[in-house]
Amino acid sequence: MRVGVLTGGGDCPGLNAVIRAVVRKGTFHYEDGFVGFMEGWRGLLEDKTMELDLSSVGGILPRGGTILRTSRTNPAKHDNGLQHCVENLKKHGCEALIAIGGDDTLSVAQKLFSNGVKVVGVPKTIDNDLSGTDFTFGFDTAVNVATSAIDRVHTTAEAHNRVIVVEVMGRDSGWIAAYSGIAGGADVILIPEVPFDIDQVAELIRQRQARGRYFSIVVVAEGAKFADGNEKHSESSSLQPGRDEFGHLRLGGIGSTVAYEIEKRTGFESRSVVLGHIQRGGTPSAFDRVLATRYGLGAIDMVHRGEFGQMAALRGNRIISIPLLEAVASNRKVSQEILDAAIGILDKLDYKVTKVS
Ligand code: F6P
């Protein structure tokens, strides 16, 4: 069978491991041939391809990024875009398509499926916010990067009696903030799911000071919101249009605002750091390499079982197949269990303040 493969949306450590697994199992077990569509949906729309075979996937397992490159192109926003995609698949003799991406990429995959394309999805995002799967690959790597950054700012914050705010990615869900905040022992964790009261955050930091803890670490997800504001923080220093083709604002900057507001209220010297794309670049963790490989193997098996309009998903420790519709229906928010873990480790005073917010 000839199978098309593409990677869409923000890149993510482990994309190459998925591509490699798909091509290796497809070649060795099913005698498939592959076409790589370049730069996400743009490649399918504009017919930009590369040959995908055993030699092109050699040595890519530990490499970050994606050999197919990526973009945030949305074919549904282009004239007859979905139709062009269908035609280009036909032109290359593709009987099936594996789309590796997050909710945006997979929502296009679902549209193409409704237009008769035999498509299988693979869940990708460092944000871990796709429904229907316990973990997306890339998340573990991002959490490890953020945790080691939090460890590092801890020692310098303590040395200077400072508050340091660490801004991590997480547009709609605070999974990276919650996990890295717990793993790094942050004193305050601010996530999009729970709008925060900055006065309460400042009070919590004051209480720590009163107990002889002269420094504090705050982890904030880029999509977190002040309780009294309704907009997310977006970057203003950009020459590009503010929104991508899926309508998303370019976020960033909440960390420095939070640091400023804390300093204003407490008088404690505060600093902020933005981890940004450092969380997305570089080599995947061992966990992500294994998970991404299992997703790739699951996806090519699904193609040969004829499970189209479906996505490979992790449930417990098993790779299963779920409808794409279920995956893109809504963002997966940080679970109550993880929220409880984040506040459960705080002492009684901190807990009181955090609980109220
Ligand atoms: O991959 C998802 C994500 O990490 C979001 O958390 C973030 O808002 C977005 O990507 C930023 O990506 P880019 O700068 O590539 O548009």
Image (tube, grey):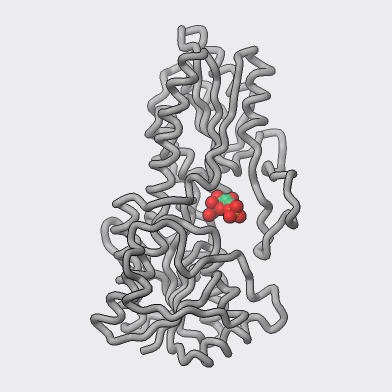
The residue shown at (38%, 26%) is 345
Residue drawn 37% across and 80% down?
307
Q: Position of residue 132 (x, y in %)?
A: 42, 61
Give above or below for 14 relative to 172.
Answer: below
Judge whether residue 172 can be spotted in this image. Answer: no
Q: Quadrant of residue 357?
A: top right
Q: Position of residue 272 (x, y in %)?
A: 59, 29
Q: Where does residue 80 sit, x and y in percent of width and height?
A: 69, 84
Visible in this render: residue 206? yes
Q: Assign the N terminus to one quadrant of the image.
A: bottom left
- Between residue 11 and residue 308, name the one nearer to us: 11
Q: Is residue 147 left or right of residue 256?
A: left
Residue 237 in picture, x, y percent from top left: 73, 44
Q: Quadrant of residue 146?
A: top left
Between residues 163 and 324, which one lies in front from this camera angle? 163
Q: Is residue 301 left or right of residue 4?
A: left
